[in-house]
Image (spheres, rainbow, N blue to C red):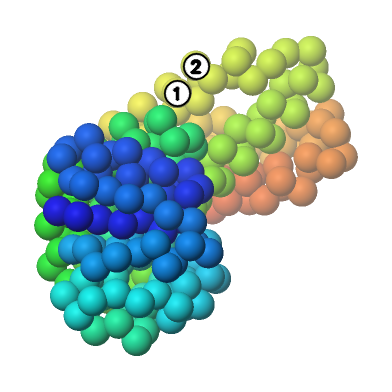
Amino acid sequence: MQITIVGRGRAGTALSRALSSVGHVTALVAHDDLDQVIDVDAVVLCVPDDALAEVASSLRVGHSTVVLHIAGSRTLDVLQPHPLVGSMHPLVALSSTEIGARRLIGATYCVAGHPRAAEIVRSLGGTTFSLPDEQRAGYHAAACVAANHLVTLLGHVAVLANHVGLTLDDFLPLAASALEDVTAMGPAAALTGPASRGDLSTIDAHLAAIPESERATYVALANAALQLAEQRRATTSS
């Protein structure tokens, strides 16, 4: 299949490499070089979400070319006025071009629209699922929490670790074991620590000990943990 990717950032470059590795003929162009896009089987827009509509409206392709985007929260409306449209959002973190190209092979994708989106995913060895338009923003929010917010949380751990003369590396095995527990038994059953026990005095001691700049984050997470513990107790007692 001949596929043009618009957008030379991490996502576009990683997708171009992944598609090429499974035999597609790919071209990678910048969003301001749309005159280089020729009639191909598919054009995949890998540009910032807010730029999708503008780039799509500026794109000129043949009547048989399918125009796709990879934005998790956006519907197909942003691809107007093209008649053949679709989307294929990869449920992976594209933290670098090299890592992203590997992860896109065999990944899970949320697809919509023209069947060519699912066809491209299958060529990558991936699996697909679909959602109604009204659920896409919520789906993408969950994806952002699972990846972006988890990374941010570990940044919070790094600050707290440094405050007592340790490093993030000292706590990564603990974090890995917690993820293993969530995988094995779910979040509620995997929860440990003072919030799990309702130990508010220990939480207060933590707040007194950590830097003031980190307290709001800690409080938000502790409150969420208390709610999760309450849900577990309610489920157990019912």
The residue at the point 81 percent across, 22 percent down is: 163
The residue at the point 63 percent across, 46 percent down is: 221
Residue 176's tag is: 1
Q: Nearer the viewer, residue 204 or 30?
A: 30
Residue 124 located left or right of residue 208: left
Q: Nearer the viewer, residue 119 or 228?
A: 119
| Quadrant position of the C terminus in the picture | bottom left
Q: Quadrant of residue 14?
A: top left
Kind of element beneath mark 2: helix
**Can see residue 220?**
yes
Kind of element beneath mark 1: helix
Q: Quadrant of residue 195?
A: top right
Amino acid on which the number 1 mark rests in the picture: Ala
The residue at the point 14 percent across, 53 percent down is: 1
x%, y% of residue 89? Answer: 33, 57
**Can see residue 139?**
no
Q: Nearer the viewer, residue 111 or 3?
A: 3
In the depicted structure, whether residue 152 falls above or below residue 34:
above
x%, y% of residue 9? Answer: 50, 48
Q: Nearer the viewer, residue 118 or 153?
A: 118
In the depicted structure, whether residue 54 falls above or below residue 164:
below
Residue 212 located left or right of residue 223: right
> Disc 1 versus disc 2: distance between alpha carbons?
5 Å
The residue at the point 50 percent across, 77 percent down is: 54
Look at the numbered discs 1 and 2 and tell me whether their residues touch, using CB distance below 8 Å.
yes
Amino acid on which the number 2 mark rests in the picture: Pro
Residue 173's tag is: 2
In the depicted structure, whether residue 168 falls above or below residue 144:
above
- Packing grade of label 2 (10 A; few <14, some 14-19, many >=20) is few
Residue 168 located left or right of residue 46: right
Residue 2 located left or right of residue 73: left
